[in-house]
Image (cartoon, helix red, strand yellow):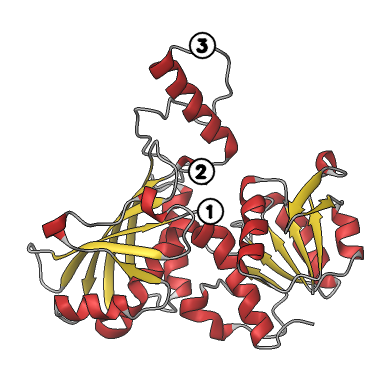
């Protein structure tokens, strides 16, 4: 199968190539696509070098599927052009997520909505994906009414520039190394916490926070769920962490909650306070699962659960989820 990766030279695009190889997706021909300034560069896939081509050449190559990770502006311009050529687009940007005509998919939850007619499929926001993977089995059993989530998000979610900023600040603080470096954030990130991800909106929330609100309802197919979020950037790599407080319509048994999560696809429960076992970003790094722990009853109000959710934002939060969508399309014969 011909597969295009659009944005193949970026942080997420590189991870897409890695995940495609690791999961042995049946790529007969890889078509790495990127901006004009990257055309002619080489990327490696399964030990072989491939030259990066332009958007136009990517369309002319007629891949069956194109996985986009090139930003919203690029997706808005080029995803329809790929789709018009009969190519199924799986888009990792925010461009199409809330378009009512485009499916927003987490395979463990709602892949069943996909049809052969869907030529642009949206990959959700990284912080939303891991939360709904953990919440879905509990929502189906107890009916989630309200979710309060605070995130602790890795610098890798911003990109290479943010990683470079953090490491340069660390070198300066620890080793006394001086030198110029680009600022991905308005403020230092190492030894700091920045309670802003993406731009502020008129309601005082950030765009990232409202993504979690709106995407959760669309993916879980339930507009009645109330969601409020605070998203925070912290100086770590490896994955995003989330403190999730969920109020259910029906009461729950904590042992049953653990059992439901343990049997849920894509979820790993790490929850043993007696031995100080709980999920951490360093443990989730380079893994595809969503890790859940610190499961405990909220003692301030009925039917309410506290949980801690961790996942590698570049993998399940981006690349892996996109590849899983492609795997589903292939398995269900939904690709041209």
| Mark 2 secondary-structure assignment | helix
Which residue is located at x 35 percent, y 52 percent? 241
Please tell me how crowded label 3 is: few (under 14), some (14-19), or many (20+) other residues with Cα within 10 Å: few
Quadrant of the snapshot with the C terminus: bottom right
Q: How many angstroms separate mark 2 from mark 3 (CA)?
A: 23 Å
Q: Earlier in the sequence, mark 1 or mark 2?
A: 2
Instruction: Please tell me which residue lies in front, 221 or 18.
Output: 18
Q: Earlier in the sequence, mark 2 or mark 3?
A: 2
Disc assigned to residue 156: 2
Please tell me how crowded label 2 is: few (under 14), some (14-19), or many (20+) other residues with Cα within 10 Å: many
Q: Marks 1 and 2: CB-CB under 8 Å?
A: yes
Work out whether 64 lies above or below 172: below
Residue 183 image-quadrant placement? top right
| Mark 1 secondary-structure assignment | loop
Residue 85 x %, y %:
86, 72
Residue 324 image-quadrant placement? bottom right
Q: Nearer the viewer, mark 2 or mark 3?
A: 3
Residue 93 x %, y %:
62, 56
Quadrant of the snapshot with the N terminus: bottom right
Specify whether 334 is left or right of 41: left
Residue 187 x %, y %:
44, 25
Give the residue number, with chain letter if any, for mark 3: 178
Q: Is residue 56 visible?
A: yes
Q: Marks 2 and 3: CB-CB under 8 Å?
A: no
Which residue is located at x 86 percent, y 52 percent? 53
Q: How many angstroms separate mark 3 from mark 1 (CA)?
A: 30 Å
Work out whether 252 lies above or below 11: below
Specify the farthest residue to the front.
47
């Amino acid at each position: 199968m011909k597969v295009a990766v659009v944005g193949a030279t970026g942080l997420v695009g590189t991870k897409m190539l890695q995940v495609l190889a690791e999961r042995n997706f049946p790529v007969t021909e890889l078509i790495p696509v990127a901006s004009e300034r990257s055309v002619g560069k080489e990327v490696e896939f399964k030990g072989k070098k491939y030259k990066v081509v332009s958007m136009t050449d990517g369309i002319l190559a007629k891949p069956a599927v194109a996985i986009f990770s090139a930003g919203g502006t690029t997706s808005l311009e080029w995803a329809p052009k790929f789709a018009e050529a009969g190519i199924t687009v799986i888009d990792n940007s925010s461009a199409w997520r809330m378009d009512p005509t485009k499916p927003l998919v987490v395979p463990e939850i709602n892949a069943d909505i996909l049809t052969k007619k869907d030529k642009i499929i949206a990959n959700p926001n990284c912080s939303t994906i891991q939360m709904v993977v953990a919440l879905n089995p509990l929502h189906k059993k107890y009916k989630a009414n309200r979710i309060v989530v605070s995130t602790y998000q890795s610098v890798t979610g911003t990109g290479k520039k943010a990683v470079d900023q953090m490491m340069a600040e660390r070198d300066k603080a620890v080793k006394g190394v001086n030198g110029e470096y680009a600022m991905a954030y308005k403020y230092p990130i190492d030894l700091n916490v920045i309670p802003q991800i993406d731009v502020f909106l008129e309601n005082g929330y950030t765009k990232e926070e409202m993504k979690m609100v709106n995407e959760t309802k669309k993916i879980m197919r339930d507009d009645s769920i109330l969601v409020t979020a605070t998203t925070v950037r912290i100086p770590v790599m490896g994955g995003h962490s989330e403190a999730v407080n969920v109020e259910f319509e029906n009461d729950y048994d904590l042992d049953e909650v653990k059992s439901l999560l343990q049997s849920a696809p894509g979820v790993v429960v790490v929850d043993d306070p007696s031995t100080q076992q709980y999920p951490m970003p360093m443990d989730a790094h380079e893994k595809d699962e969503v890790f859940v722990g610190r499961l405990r009853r909220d003692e301030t109000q009925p039917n309410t659960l506290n949980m801690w959710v961790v996942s590698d934002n570049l993998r399940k939060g981006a690349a892996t989820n996109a590849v899983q969508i492609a795997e589903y399309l292939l398995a269900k014969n939904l690709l041209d």
